[in-house]
Image: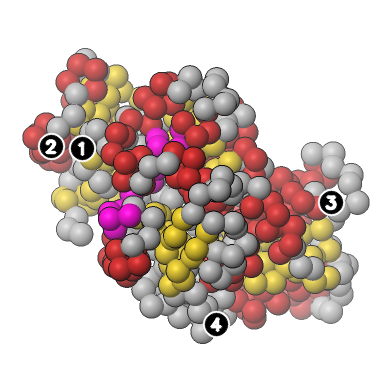
Amino acid sequence: MLGRVFKAYDIRGVYPDPLTDQMAWQIGYGCAKFLLADAEAAGETTPMMKNVIVGRDMRQSSPTLAAELIAGLTNGGADVIDIGLVDTPMMYFAINHLDCAGGVVVTASHNPPQYNGFKVSKRQAKPVGEASGLAEVRKQAAMVDRTLIGAKTDGRVEQRDFWSAYKAHVLKHCDLGGKSLKIVVDASNGMAGTMVPKVFGTKGEEVEGLTIVPLNFDNTKGEFVHEPNPLVASNLEQLQEAVKKEKADLGVCYDGDADRCVIVDETGEIVGCDHLTAALVPYFLGDRPGSSVVYDLRSTKAVPEEIERAGGKPIRSRVGHVFMKQEMAAHRCAFGGELSGHFYFRSNFNADSGAIAMATVLSAVAASGKPVSAMIEPVKRYVQSGEINFEIEDKDQALAEIREHYIGRGTIDDLDGVTVDCFESEGWWANIRKSNTEPLLRLNAEARDAELLGTVVEEISPLLGERVAH
């Protein structure tokens, strides 16, 4: 049964079937055994290295699952610091603020309300995925028998409030320089509805010059006016209309646990997360030339071009926060951006943060003195396909055929799926990746103009199987 809820990067499922209260206890026990052993293996002997942070989101099932998780953690020998109702990046902050063994947040992020799950981090808020610890957590969870453990508790539990320290940390990244900005924030009835008022103020009063118009801040029912996934264009329609109606400078939409966000410009136009990454490069590298910036390999070519133009070093990464954070640490990157709406910051322990992403965007817009659309327009110089899915059983065979088909035309690499780069010679590139969970291949392509892009997609598509309608 446990195998049904363990995924590549986290643990999640519909509650209470297949995700049960008993599983939450088992997962807590498994996390305790893994996180404490990991800290010990690293030679960490600080007083807090027996502590595990636990937070939760606003879903109706989260209090029960958090209580069972905490019971399992303490039965497994961990001391628990319960930080209550928080956005996921708050957990990353608390782990580093206290120098703990790790943390677990109860959340299903952007999934519908009937889902729930767990995101696990180890020391320094390093992510725990299948290859970096979740397999061990699952093993420990599967082996434990609660009836044999009984009521025996080896760890203690305490509640702590970190909002004041977290607010100070986030607002270090927000400086409007005497300018005034009006923004609309759509909390998607998720954890941004708690985070934004506590950090920025409900109407932006905690930041001089900032005015916030709130949308969908009520998260007390654990229900959503729209799906809490800002990558789906239809979920941004309410925000787009509000930005135009309020004549705001920009809009921000968060996902359920507020670790991701997407912005719209002053005209209501959705800003691609890779375009936002490219536009933020001058802000980060203006006084730090030579720094590295990491981006996921699906991003527009404008991202590495802007990094090099600003005197930085582009670091191309596999897709996924596990890999992005690894590259952030390995190359001491100033920041990083992922197409999924995750933005990473060296000043935030190399971790992603929706709150700091918003603070940074506000600071960059104020510093530029330009409307958001004028900041973004220069980096929208190529035409993108967006992600196109193809259904196919033998994904590996299809990728092999792609490699063979394009030998001798540009460069081919296997960093994440297969990337064919004919940009210098023909003006296009494409990446084809496998889905982790479905018989799908995912195509992202980009070209110098729309006609060429259409030709490229038409040429590649027959090699990938049956195109899936949106």
Which of discs 3 and 1 lies nearer the camera? The answer is 1
Q: In this view, does 26 lie to the left or right of 290?
A: right
Report the front residue among 444 and 447.
447
Q: Which of marks 2 and 4 is nearer the N terminus?
A: 4
Location of residue 342 with respect to 226 vertically, above or below: above
Inspect the image, locate mark 4, and give the three-letter code of the amino acid beneath it.
Thr
Q: What residue type is labelled 2?
A: Ala
Residue hosting label 3: 49
Q: Position of residue 247 (x, y in %)?
A: 33, 62
Label 3 – label 2 distance at C-alpha: 54 Å
**Front residue (pair 291, 463):** 291
Mark 3 vs mark 2: in front: 2
Residue linked to disc 2: 450
The Cα–Cα distance between marks 2 and 4, rounded to whole angstroms, is 45 Å
Span shown in magenta: 266-281
Looking at the image, tell me whether mark 3 or mark 1 is earlier in sequence order. Answer: 3
Q: Residue pushed farthest front? A: 178
Q: What's the amino acid at mark 1?
A: Val
Q: Is residue 322 left or right of residue 51?
A: left
Badge 2 marks a residue whose secondary structure is helix
Residue 227 on image: x %, y %: 38, 70
Residue at 44%, 39% (x, y): give it.
368
Identify which residue is drawn at 38% across, 42% down. Answer: 370
* Few, some or many residues within 10 Å of mark 3 (<14, 14–19, 20+): many
- Report which residue position mark 4 lands on: 220
